[in-house]
Image (cartoon, rainbow, N blue to C red):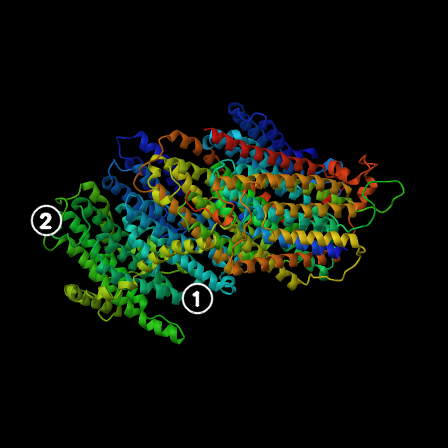
Amino acid sequence: MEIIMIVLAAILFATGVYNILQKQLLRIVIGTVLISHGAHLFILTMGKLKRGAPPVEVYGVTEYADPLPQALILTSIVISFGVTSFLLVLAYRAYKLNQTDNMEKMRGSEHE
Amino acid sequence: MNNLAILPIILPILASVIVAFFPGKLNIVRPLSKIFMVVFLGVMLFITFKVYSDGMIVLQGGGWDAPFGISLVLDYLSIILVLTTYVIATAAVFYAPHSLSDQQEKFYFYTFFFLLISGVSGAFITGDLFNLFVFFEVLLMASYGLIVLGNGKAQLRESLKYVLINLFSSMLFVTTVAFIYSLVGTVNMAHIAERVDSIPAEDQGIVTVIGILLFFVFAVKAAIFPLYYWLPNSYVVPNPVVSALFGALLTKVGIYSIFRVFTLIFVHDTGVTHQLFIWLAMLTMIFGVIGALSTNNVKLIITYNIIPAIGFILMGIGLFNEDGLSGSIYYLMHDMVIKAALFLLIGALIVAAGTKDLSQMSGVIQRFPLLGWLFFIGSLVLAGIPPFSGFIGKLLLLRGALDQGEILLTVVALLSSLLILLSMIRIFIRGFWGEKMEGMTTNPSKVHALTIPATFLISISIYLGVGAETVLPYIDQISSYLLERTEYISSVLKG
Amino acid sequence: MVYAVFAPLIFAILIPFLSRIKQRIHTGWLILPVPLLIFIYFLQFVGANFETKMQSTTWIPTLNISLDFYLDGLSLLFALLISGIGTLVVLYSIYYLNKEEQLGHFYTYLYIFMASMLGVVLSDNVFVLYTFWEFTSLSSFLLIGYWHHREKSRYGALKSMLITVLGGFSLLGGLILLTIETGTTSIREMVAMTDVIINSEYFIAILIFLLLGAFTKSAQFPFHIWLPDAMEAPTPVSAYLHSATMVKAGIYLMARFSPIFNEVPLFFILLSIFGLVTLAWASYMAVRQTDLKGILAFSTISQLGMIMAMLGFGTTYGVFAAVFHILNHATFKGSLFMVAGIVDHETGTRDIRRLGGLMTFMPISATLAVFGTFSMAGVPLPFLNGFYSKEMFFQSSLGLEGSGTFVEGLITAIPIIAVVGSIFTFIYSMYLFFGTFRGGYKEDQLPTKPHEAPIMMLVPPAILVLGVIVIGLFPNIFNNALITHSADAIYGDTVTKDIKYWHGLDSRAFQMSLAVVVLGVVLYLTKDKWSKIYSVLPGSLSLNRVYDWIVEKIESVSNKITTSYMTGSLRLYMMLILTAIILMTAGTLLYSGGMNFNTVDLAPITAQEVIVAIVMAIAAIGTTVARNRIAAILILGVVGYGLAILFVMYSAPDLALTQLIVETVTVVLFLLCFYHLPNLSSEGQSVAKTGSNILVSIGYGLLMFVIGISAYNSRFAETISSYFMENTYEEGGGHNAVNVILVDFRGIDTLFEVAVLFGAALGIYAMIKLRSNKGAK
């Protein structure tokens, strides 16, 4: 199963990167979100999958899933969320001010 | 006493929250921030003294023994970088009111400023790889906040690129942490190092690959060739005080992380990793100076000069001998100070001349001699002319290089120094010398106010050169301690 | 000695204050005693029974850098020149520079130079020497640029700095290599370890690094081009730095290290070739100059070449003659510069084509010039010191020994080149004097009416000319008291030579001198006929054009390279970054053999998971092709929710919950922000671009896949997580291990995660608020 998950994460990375390489802002932002999904999936997979119950201590259960990767993912999800929200507003503002959502037109010049 | 280790990160966070309560009240926020910074600087001096007299301080977060909790490690290396950070920040906080508009100050400049310091200090002292990611995000978030401060067209445009590239590398960072976790099942750096040590030599291949991947994560932040493209424009658009903080701190956190990781964890295949660094260091120097010579925008010249300095520091890591590492550390410290100073000076110059374009400037020194001479000395410091701070680092680095017979590397480093000097002296000759230009500022007192914090930093640079003996033995101590590795590992894991 | 070096430096710092306080008195008077006292201090060491002297002060012991000042014959000679001529130059400058000039700056630079130059010649520690060395370059830069409102001054200043600092950095490389090889930073100890150095595998590198340092500083061909442009500096500076002292630093360096290199043929070959080429080329070029100072500049270059060559000969005679000529050159060239300055000052021009017939107006200056130029030309008269050293030069050029065809050929050529160079020296010397002081007086071409300079301005050159005569008449007094000590120091052994005026008619050297005079006179008189050659020979091959071309190209090529990739295009940046990562990581992967496909310890595959995975993959691919923005956002949502389902399946309920909430909020935010944005269009990128995008994306995905699989399959240690499960309740006080980790074990993560959110919220607020504020304005 882990192999399938690694393949899926790799696909998320590839599509994310492909989106980032496009011109339109929306696609680029979508690309970053896909990449963070891929990264989270990687963490989970690297901690091994389906090795037991959710890491909530219950009497009598001896096999639990690895709690540490989950904690790391949780932190990462929240941080990504913060950054993505910021990015969204930034993208919106940049669009408004520069009057374009095409990154290739937001090159700028040396003297401003 | 161990709790001292949390102060460098918690004090600025508190300050950050406190100043966020009075966004509009500049007459409260300004003096408050200054007082905070001066007090904090005193505290950091005390901690530095403590570390050097009593040995390194390790705080196991929440009282959990490593590797289960998060270790904060004030070792000889991290504390001097924290101290340098606070020194620069102190200069910046005195510079800011004269450089920023009221509007910008009101929009949480000081909050982001303290957040940035907290993130940078955290990145220096954390002993946990994932926690390093968190601190990276803190300092990046703060830098995002600072870069959009102006909220102008250019700021937003460049910060967009900056945020996107950094977001990409952050996610790669998380992924790399996952890979490492898979290999050794831990995220504490000392523990990783210990476990990587026990991996048999024939299985080190995958470790090296992941090391290289991690190198790229940091290299994007450190602006190493060929990953620095985001840097020049995003450092040029913000206010000089913000550029100074970025130039002095952000890339340095990246190179510090490379330093830490490649002296502690990935030291088993130096023939691949460290040799690669030497090549990249050369290319970084060359392309950096080429950039610095390519433009007439004075601020951009300074910005590009960040890049070769990173090349110099990387060179020492690549050499991986005592002289090389000492040189890198010295250079790192020196470069933080001088870059901040130069950005502050350039800010003053732009105010004085009323333009960023070198071809429009001339004769500024006739009205602002102090500014001119400080800039001149700053250029010499940057080019590594003795007896200033840049020379000490360069001497050690070159000694390390020649000790291993790296003649080509030496020649590249020396030529880059010459071209760095040329790029800086061009500003001095064309901007400061010559006939007095038209359209110089009508507000000289503002320029003087901007010059004072820079004077403070330049004095430190001079001191780090002339008074090198007061600092250098400690630096040598650091590099032998880094090469030894065991002290760090055992101090963190002793619990 | 320490005080002697640092006194000028201290005064240099005080000068800006002095010049402010004392407006009425010329600053020069206030500080004149400094070099004079230093001169007197060093004078006490002169004498037949001279003994070396050493003084040490620690500075940076960790790097073996200490202020070791060592006085031997060689440094004594230089110290006397620096302080002695320094005194005269300061005196001269008092009359040369007006009180209206920025005297504070001038004297500050000059005294920084004086201190550094003394430091160079007295330091035994190589890094201290290097420090002072760079400071001589820098003070020279500032002095050349003293009248920085002039374009030419700025040009000359930059040129001199670039070339001399290039040499300085090269010198640094050589010195570091020397310290590594010998393990010491003391020159004297290095000399004692000559064997180690000569047999070092880096010997060639050391030699080249050091030579480059010396050649740039001492203006040897082809690095001499900075010196003529340095003539933009005020004349006292030219007399002091650019003729008597600083330009001899390279000579000094070679002399200092010659005990080490003396026996090495390469040293002989390089030094004599460069020295003689410099001598011949510069004297040839000097004849062509029209600016008095230009002639003197090229003359200085050629004389430096001559000294360099003599050091290269490495014979006792050559070394002795070199030292003697250092002294002689300083006297006659110093006086000539001062006279040129006087002519400039009193007539308003230095263009020799506009001068002439000044003898009647300026008789004293003319007399001084006679002695200077004739001494320089080597006219055989017993009261001209230049003649002695010129003849010794010829003598030393004869009778060199060596083996190998190349070396033997060189040995045959040396005397010939020496004579040729000297002929041109003779010509420009005559030209200099007769062109300025004799011939027709061109009143209409002079900006001001010429008259003799104030008497005090004539005193310094007169003292130097007196030196010329006294040395010429009684060479052996100087010889015993000073010159032999210097030569001993260089040669590393006792060198005693008597200086004789008359060697007899059959002496080859004397015959060479005579040939020079005869041919020189003939060629001088027929100068107009053959001077057309100058339009051909340097012409477009001029080294100055090379320099200009390089400097110009550095900027334009840098600009071209940088703008070619710094286009501001995010796509390009990402492409370059990704390509670098993919290539280098994949390279490492293949090289270090880190791939590992031996799958172990896998969880079983179930249909539900596979379906979720497939849906997510399709959705992810769907985002790349979706045209409608709402659709794209919703498809992205599918990926997020799919991830949440996976979290549920893999026993991570907390994650699933968080992911659900975050995904929902994100989608809403997306919709809010992008509702007003234009719809997604077909990208309209060229096929090539699309192709490379796909290639890079797949490459990156593939790389991550391979590393991911390999990492998963390479487990070297058990994870630390069992500890968390064991302690989550007993120590952490909670049943949910993930929560306990977040709030307790890794509480710092969570705290700073909140800090990130805090920052993000403020940032968003600021962005929105600032806009509405602006709108209100």
Is residue C2 something that shows in the picture? Answer: no
Q: Chain of mark 1?
A: C
Left or right position of C435 against C82? left
Say which element carries label 1: loop
Q: Quadrant of the C terminus of chain B?
A: top right
Q: Amino acid at mark 1?
A: Glu
Q: Please tell me which residue lies in front, B296 or B6.
A: B296
Q: Residue C70 at x, y = what percent?
A: 44, 49
Residue at 73% over, 45% down: C644
Distance from the alpha carbon under mark 1 to that under mark 2: 58 Å
Disc on the earlier residue, 1 or 2: 1
Q: Please tell me which residue lies in front, C149 or C645.
A: C645
Left or right position of B42 against B183? left
Is residue C301 something that shows in the picture? Answer: yes
Left or right position of B211 against C506? right
Q: Chain of mark 2?
A: C
Q: Which mark is residue C21?
A: none
Q: Residue B23 at x, y = what percent?
A: 55, 27
Do circles 1 and 2 both sit on a common chain? yes
Would you name the residue on which mark 1 appears? C263
Left or right position of B300 against B434? right
Tags 1 and 2 touching, CB below 8 Å: no
Say which element carries label 2: helix
Q: Amino acid at mark 2?
A: Glu
Q: Residue B460 at x, y = what percent?
A: 50, 38
- Residue found at the far right of this picture: A60
Q: How many marks?
A: 2
Would you name the residue on which mark 2 appears? C443
> Is residue A33 positioned above or below C380 on the image?
above
Mark 2, other Cα within 10 Å: few <14 / some 14–19 / many ≥20: some
Mark 1, other Cα within 10 Å: few <14 / some 14–19 / many ≥20: few
